[in-house]
Amino acid sequence: MPPIINTCYGNCSDEVLLQAIIQKEMGAFEALYDRHASPVYNLLIRIVHEENVAEELLQDTFWQVWQKASQYNGAGAGISWLHRIARNKALDQLRRQKADSQPKLMQGEPTEWPLASHQPSAESEFEQVWTCQQVRQALAQIPCEQRLCLELAYFEGLSHQEIAEQIQAPIGTIKTRIRIGMQKVERWLLGCGYTTRAWPNVASAKGM
């Protein structure tokens, strides 16, 4: 889909665009696509590592947004909901790839080492999903501006500078929100009985 400049929706927030998409406003959908297609594709390619697959998943992601925008309940930033759809589709793709490789093993056919080398990557993705669920419960307890910065840092792997550019806030503010948000999330997890190992190292995200 080529970029389209929409004067009606170009300055609207993601949340407003999603509400308009529920009403099947094509202009709002085009504005959302133009704004987020590139970062969503970058997220997908980091998971599936194949350009053609990432492109197909990108189209599937926005098709789901068009069809099921009403599933966005306003909890959290619209961009986080959009990225969650894309990430789930990418993980489903990894599961399908893993399932497709298993019949050969059941038939007793030899498995080449290059095929086997992809399996740890898929398994690590599944482990990440399980860990992320714990962190998301904690993120839901903190202010939305801190939650958004942490989601972009941990779940999307963005640097401080990239987050500052994306949400148009000073980089010092981003660092403060991430630091305070991390402290609140860790306290919440520890209070619920999780060990410190259940809290992934957000500081290890790119550029931190």
Image (cartoon, grey):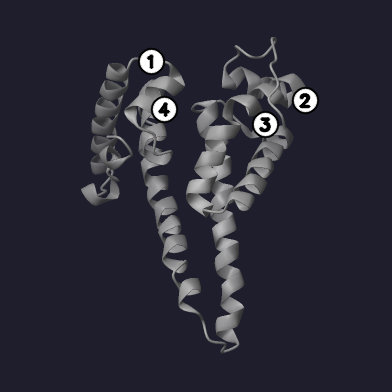
Of labels 4 and 1, earlier in sequence is 4
Indicate left or right for 70 with 167 as reference. right
Q: Nearer the viewer, residue 41 or 153?
A: 41
Residue 104 is situated, as x and y percent measured from the top left of the image, at 59, 81
Rendered residue at 25%/47% (across/down): 193
Q: Name the residue under label 2.
A: 24
Rendered residue at 58%/69% (across/down): 99
Distance from the alpha carbon under mark 4 to that under mark 1: 12 Å
Amino acid type, residue under disc 1 in the picture: Ala
Q: In this view, does 74 lie above or below 155?
A: above
Q: Name the residue under label 4.
A: 148
Residue 180 is situated, as x and y percent measured from the top left of the image, at 25, 26
Q: Is residue 185 visible?
A: yes
Q: Which mark is residue 169?
A: 1
Distance from the alpha carbon under mark 2 to that under mark 4: 27 Å
- Mark 4 vs mark 1: give the one in front: 1
Q: Can residue 143 be seen in this view?
A: no
Q: Mark 3 points at which residue?
A: 69
Query: Element under label 3?
Result: helix
Query: Element under label 2?
Result: loop
